[in-house]
Amino acid sequence: MKKNILSTIMVCSIALTAVASPSIVLADSVDVQIKQQDEKINALKGQQDKAQAEINALESTVASVNEKVASLEAKQTELSNDTEKLQEKIGTLKVRIAKREKSIQKQARDAQTNDQSTNFVSAVLEADSLSDAISRVHAMSTIVNANNDLVKQQKQDQKSVEQSIQENEEKINEMAATYKELQSQKDALAAQQAELNVLKTSLAAEQATAESDKAKLNKQKEEAKAAQIKVLKAQQDSSKKPAEATAVKAEKPAEDQKTDNSSDNTATPSEAPVQESKPVEKPTTDSTSSSGNSEPVSAPSGSTSSNGGGVDHSGSGNMYAVGQCTWYVKSVAPWVGTYWGNGAQWGASAAADGYTVNSTPATGAVVVFAAGQSVGGQWTADGSYGHVAYVDSYNPANNTITISQGGTGFSSPTGPNTQTISASGYTYIHR
């Protein structure tokens, strides 16, 4: 009897161990995988923190460069204003020089024709008295000194023009150099920032995948524990039945027990039934991982007329400030002067250079707008500097011109910005 009870308990223990152990092993394996995922996640977070630190440092550098950009842009604005003032000064001086040159040439011709030295002698000899002679000599000396002062002033103005031209070119070259430096720094910083952002995004994606895999493993672990509890409960229930049957037998009469004992001695003891158990299969998990730019201005179409009287400045280059109306017209009409001043001064400057300047519109001419003058009733030229544009075409049927132009007030400062307006009321420079 005791032998049967012991056998039953041993069989139940073996069955319990056999069924429960796969779940225990599975739970332990999942714990190891979860630990590995935690280590992977922590490593990815460390890489993210490092990338973020690099991004923060780069953003600090970007902020510093942006401050420098703002400073240089302000300097460029100042240089542009200085250039406009120099252009105005140069234009005024060139007109003054041209006018004075005519006066000097006229006086030189008079001196050669009338023999100035003879005039001095005649003035003295024809004097009525000594005081009259002295007065005449003084008057003649005053005239001579005035002529000498005129020539001296002419030389000073010419030297001032040369100095202003040199200063203007230096400022324009400085503006070009600073602009190139700014663009280079901006491009380099943008590339580095983009690269770090890609790295950060890639690491974030890998971390998200790792955390998703960890969540799946935790779910597996919970399922394995639930299965383990279910199997243990089933085995506990099955182990109670043989014990209850043994207790019932112990309560039977002695003779029944003897009969049972004799039958136990003669019969082959039967093995206690063992409950068959299927090992719990480890669920498969699907894991995915992820690794994580100014066009040049083209000359407008349109024929040009030539009278051959003006000075051709095609080889002088374009020394006007980029983005100004004067720069655009010079770029599409190279024959215009490099130093004609601001737009409002171009008519006088062109006339001084021998060009025909009038109010007659024509294709290929340069149209000049005075300071504060209305441009076709659509907008107004600058109140200090005026405006210039290139005449692409002239329509005599309705007396309109189609112009192309540049300037800081347009969406494309370097042009071309086209506009059709009435042709009346403006000054035209003809080549």
Image (spheres, grey):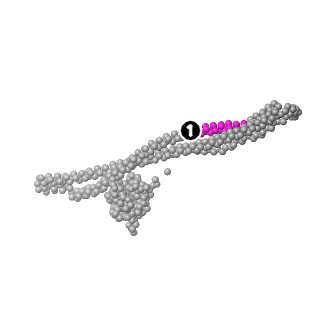
Q: Residue at x 29, y 55 (%)?
A: 96
Q: Which residue is mark 1?
A: 46
| View extreme (top): residue | 2
The quarter holding residue 346 reads bottom left
Foreground residue, 38 or 411? Answer: 38
Q: Position of residue 243 (x, y in %)?
A: 78, 34
Q: Give the total of numbered labels.
A: 1
Foreground residue, 320 or 415? Answer: 415
Describe the element under mark 1 as helix, strand or loop.
helix
Quarter in which the N terminus is drawn: top right
Q: Which residues are magenta?
A: 20-41
**Is 229 left or right of 376, judged from the image as shown?**
right
**Is 24 left or right of 75, judged from the image as shown?**
right
The quarter holding residue 44 reads top right
The amino acid marked with disc number 1 is Gly
| View extreme (front): residue | 253
Q: Position of residue 104 (x, y in %)?
A: 26, 55
Q: Is residue 165 magenta?
A: no
Foreground residue, 358 or 317? Answer: 358
**Is 92 left or right of 409, judged from the image as shown?**
left
Q: Position of residue 423 (x, y in %)?
A: 37, 64
Quarter in which the C terminus is drawn: bottom left
Q: Is residue 33 magenta?
A: yes
Predominant secondary structure, magenta span: helix
